Image: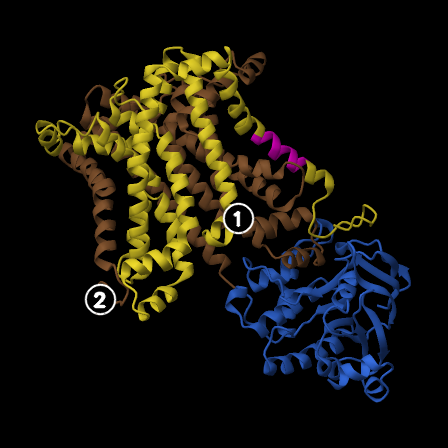
Amino acid sequence: MGRRPLIHRSPMPGLGLSMGITLTMLSIVVLLPIGALLLRGAVFGLDGIWDTVNRERVWKALFLSFRLSLFAAVFNLVFGVLLAWVLVRYRFPGRRLLDAAVDLPFALPTAVAGIALTALYAPNGVFGALAKEVGWKIAYSQWGIFLALVFVGLPFVTRTVQPVVEEIEREVEEASATLGAGRLHTMAHVILPMLTPAALTGFALSLARAVGEYGSVIFIAGNIPLLTEIAPLLIVIRLEEFKYDEAAAIGIAMLAISFAMLLAINLIQIWSRRRIGHV
Amino acid sequence: MHIEIDEISKTFGTTAALHPVSLAIPSGALVALLGPSGSGKTTLLRILGGLEFPTSGRVLFDGQDATGLTVQQRRAGFVFQSYALFRHMTVFENIAYGLKARPRASRPPRAEIARRVQKLLELIQLPDIGARFPSQLSGGQRQRVALARALAIEPRMLLLDEPFGALDAKVRKELRQGLRDIHDETGLTTVFVTHDQDEAMELADLVVVMSGSQSGGRIEQIGKPQDIRARPATPFVRDFISA
Amino acid sequence: MSDISPPHFRAATEEPPLARWALIGIAALGLAVLVFAPLIVVFAEALAKGWLAAVKSLGNRDALSAIRLTLTIAAIAVPLNAAFGIAAAWFITKFDFRGKAFLITLIDLPFSVSPVVAGLCIVLMFGANSWMGGWLVANGYPIVFALPGIALATMFVTFPFVARELIPVMIEQGRAEEEAALTLGASGWRIFRTVTLPNIRWALLYGVLLCNARAMGEFGAVAVVSGKIRGQTATMPITIEMMYNEYLSVAAFSLAAVLTALALITLLLKALLEHRHAGDLAAARRH
């Protein structure tokens, strides 16, 4: 370790200034606040955190958040890959409009998305009324949460997969055909494996986003404890009761679980990248 | 297999790629399509392989009209200029791909596939690389793997697009002999595209010299290498082979 | 592609027309239900009682103060994050040091933290019952339930946007041009202004655009730190929530429509940038 200097000498100006701004702002805006959360947890103690988290209402909320996020991310994985393929490979009227629409969930404030989805899917909304006809309750049920999470995670997979679809060499697909493979076989065995690393990246981003999502969910969820109450909402409720320790405990649990998930997905991704290699 | 190209033409949109051309390739021959870029030689090869469809004219395999056959139905072993190996598969999986892609009824059992792949790896003189990924191979090795992959489907003919184009001079010479050997061993009708006249003259039984123009590529001369050298049929051929 | 050929002449790299149209249909239907319908409903609900009611509700004191607050927050958070993004990208791409990958991970951290947890962190750090917050409040500088806290929470959630956009672009461009300027005797500030900035301006604008859209729309983090004091710490999204919960549908959706229009303008500018200046944006954005 001692052999490599911490910072290599460079004739480039601005080292002190750029490093100073970077580290100072990173510390004030991100690191110290996160440190404050961890410190609060440390003072509260592992027992305290465990006692807080180990209650039915908290478990149910955490489990609900992660389970529905996973479902939404899986939906977005499938739909996102399909969308990326359609937008890159096919030419049809309205393609540019669809392409632009994919980004809307990035640009639209979550609270706006929340009230808009609720207005649509509530029993008196346009789609909600249709669903009600067949006895399907979307808003104010877990379906509503799922829908909101699908919405906020929609762009990730498409945007990571699109450039990869563009780079697929036609010759590779042609090679598969000359070897006798039908189009479906080529799709399943040649094209999809090539898209996998990028799709997994998008999946991970979509999952991370959904797990922490608050604004678009709380309007449509109904927020019934044990049934449709998500973990971030529980933190907000604890804060409003001035139970800072309990809020911190749930916050730390969420951080821990989402980092564990991101780590797992990163490992899968490294593994699949390695398999494909770089020619 | 005997291949006959009957008045084939091809236009892409408004650009003409091939002026109607005709050509008969005897069964078991090793044929070079030689010409500069824009002479339509790759287009002609892709039409034979079923990757492109002619605007007019017919292709006959052993006297039967094959113009409407899909790529999959043609069973032409095709080696691409970039090799187009599947990056996410090992060499073994690449070569086994065509056999595994067959419908269940005609798919050989697992052990048989493994045996055939191993035989092909020995044919290309790389018996020990089955477990590697394409990214771990040299250019020459990739080319040979692409050849083995094309041979695995028991093709009716072998089509190669600039098979040595991406290699350095030394490897190129070695692999030329390798292709000749494999051709002689399998007896497959083989057509390859090249812009390198030495390669065409040295390797092929029959050389087809092509030229490009506004109205599309056309065939200038068909003949044995020594005949073309001795008696160029047109000024174009004379210029091209003396260049 | 081969239009003249009979239908069974399909290129090997194309799906059968039926499959193609089915896939296009699924894509269009999915986006219609998930994206276009919510978009339309925002404007439909805002105009449910006519233009006049919608415009009138925007002139309401609470709505006006929310708009003013949101603009103020964006005017603070976005330039600061842009400055950070430029500094961080310069530090990371112009120098070699140990722990660079770790630093990039730390900068990206806010993307994997729930906005609510981000707000919670700031409350725990600067809240009245923390030692630092207590001292600040005692000296008349409250952070939480006040403007600085909202700005800080907004900065937290939008922290990586500009840096993430600039780093790949500046890596791609390398250091050669700056080094050349250096040998010609230019000062550091001059090099940045005349060599680097012209090369990164479109990427910078792109990052600022995304950062701004998120800053104006942030809800979760702000909901936690703002205290939701009407007319004082309620931003536009917070005010939308309050109005919605009070069944002031037209007012809530009118304010939402303003934010939606902003989102649409953002998308339009973004598409324009991607179209016009694709070469100057990060490689992943070129499509």
Residue C14's spot in the image, x, y percent?
70, 48
Q: Residue at x 42, y 37 (%)?
A: A207
Q: In the shown orientation, is residue C174 left or right of residue C120?
A: right
* Chain identifier of the yellow chain: C
Say if B112 sits above or below A252 in the image: below
Residue A219 visible in the snapshot = yes
Q: Position of residue C29 (x, y in %)?
A: 61, 29
**Residue at x 36%, y 24% (from the top left corner):** C237
Q: Main secondary structure of the magenta part?
A: helix
Residue annotated with mark 2:
A5
Q: Secondary structure at mark 2?
A: loop
Q: Chain B's shade in the image?
A: blue
Residue C25 among those drawn in magenta: yes
Q: Which residues are magenta?
A: C22-31
Residue C61, percent from left and from top? 32, 15
**Residue B214, quarter of the rendered image:** bottom right
Name the residue that disc number 1 marks. C276
